[in-house]
Amino acid sequence: MAVHQDLRATNVDCADCPIRHRAVCARCETEELARLEQIKYYRSFQAGQPVVWSGDRMEYVASVVSGIATLTQTMEDGRRQMVGLLLPSDFVGRPGRDSVAYDVTAVTDLVMCCFRKKPFEELMLSTPHVGQRLLEMTLDELDAAREWMLLLGRKTAREKISSLIAIIARRDASLRQRKVSGRFVFDLPLTREEMADYLGLTLETVSRQITALKKDGLIELEGNRNVTIPDFDALLDQTGDDNDGGFLV
Amino acid sequence: MAVHQDLRATNVDCADCPIRHRAVCARCETEELARLEQIKYYRSFQAGQPVVWSGDRMEYVASVVSGIATLTQTMEDGRRQMVGLLLPSDFVGRPGRDSVAYDVTAVTDLVMCCFRKKPFEELMLSTPHVGQRLLEMTLDELDAAREWMLLLGRKTAREKISSLIAIIARRDASLRQRKVSGRFVFDLPLTREEMADYLGLTLETVSRQITALKKDGLIELEGNRNVTIPDFDALLDQTGDDNDGGFLV
DNA sequence: CTTTTCTTTTGATCTGCATCAAAGCAGACC
DNA sequence: GGTCTGCTTTGATGCAGATCAAAAGAAAAG
């Protein structure tokens, strides 16, 4: 999720935190920053560790400082669907509701910047900018969810994998402030099984399709995490999307 | 989307409009109501008519007064996925962005209560309650989208149809203020093809599964729109969901 | 009432992905 | 080094749902 250009980071701890950035926005009061600082704290999780379970109370809202987390839903018989992928600067939590409807899990080691919910909600009421920013972020997430629904409902396995690799490449590039063209090199943050849960496939199908993309020269692999995309547009052609560049998130 | 209990409707024109209700909330100023009235207007659409196309500018935000509309995404080769279903009291539009990313279509005759975007955005800045309510609604929609993603990614055809019928029954019942148990009778607002677009299936599969549910006594059909659910819990058992009643939307 | 058009059902066949099974690989730990 | 343990690949087979095709209803139009 992109950070506003008119915002400046004031420390490295939480450089990408969208909430905090909003608080130090040139348009806002320094008082807000002070109040956000008071209710802010950090939490760390190890790779694989649950952050919260579906149905639990979550007494804070938070943004990802570093690492990756997933939101997943699980059916009684164990079928699992990922419904959210949180990268640094993404937000999680629901002001106005105290329990979560899905499992949140740390995929890699994870640091989150948390705000206790009650004071955060009060802050939202008194400072419209914070709520405004949150609405904007939630609407972006909704757009992303709708893109994801098209993928789940109508794309083929090959299109799904191509889309996911393109999404990760793009987000990785934007986090590193690189531009979106030329040769991409990055590590897949997810296992084959996690990719399958993202895409509504089995891990075997994911593995087979990645092998196929490799054979077709659309991606190169070093080990089974490190990916190189020699020609990003060629990969985009495989996603089934209108690749006119007008892309969200 | 449920309307707050502490809100009262003041006219029949737009009885379920969540924005307007918020404006006449006992906690809010009457001034807000007056300002909302100034920027409000109604638009009607005939069944089948497009409301906006993907990529168009949408210079208003709106809530559905009566009728049904869909949000759909379409791939170049014509594959289509519904990504939103708007029933009365649902909201559509994006403060802060001027173009839409999907087609909005009237499924039945449709009346929408529209607010010109610019003044609406200004109103949001000055009256936190309106923005607050909008955030709440957007978060609800995001939860619904995530439930929908589980359906698209992991459910079988039978589970998908059962889920859709249950969703429509529940929303129909809540619109009519009936309680959620006992015998449900209602009309399907969607054609088989529209249901297929909702569920990520083909219309033939939808038809076959509906026939199967009928044969198994889980639903009764009169014509091919009017549905009776003799035993709602029995239908819920077919959806694959934890039917502990803790359901959103 | 008849004709046209759209929607729905039903049938036959095909195929993409799931499932089941086993072998290959790589990092962690002793 | 060797042995685990968890991840990934590859193979063989099966099946749910797609596709192709046509008939049967239902609603709209003349």
Image (cartoon, coloured by chain):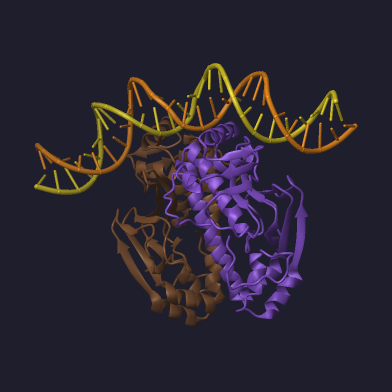
Chain colours: A purple, B brown, C orange, D yellow
Judged left or right of residue B4, residue B210 is left
Judged left or right of residue A121, residue A200 is left
Residue at left offset 76%, top offset 61%: A42
Q: Is residue B136 above or below residue C18?
A: below
- Res B57 quadrant in image: bottom left
Judged left or right of residue A182, residue B108 is left
Farthest residue toward the bottom?
Answer: B31
Q: Is residue B135 above or below residue B247?
A: below
Q: Is residue B206 above or below residue A16?
A: above
Judged left or right of residue B153, residue B228 is left
Q: Position of residue B82 (x, y in %)?
A: 42, 48
Residue at left offset 72%, top offset 58%: A112
Between A62 and D8, the residue placed more toward the observer is D8
Q: Position of residue B48 (x, y in %)?
A: 30, 53
Q: Is residue A74 above or below residue B105?
A: above
Q: Position of residue A27 (x, y in %)?
A: 60, 79
Q: Position of residue B115 (x, y in %)?
A: 41, 71
Q: Is residue B20 visible?
A: yes
Q: Is residue A121 visible?
A: no
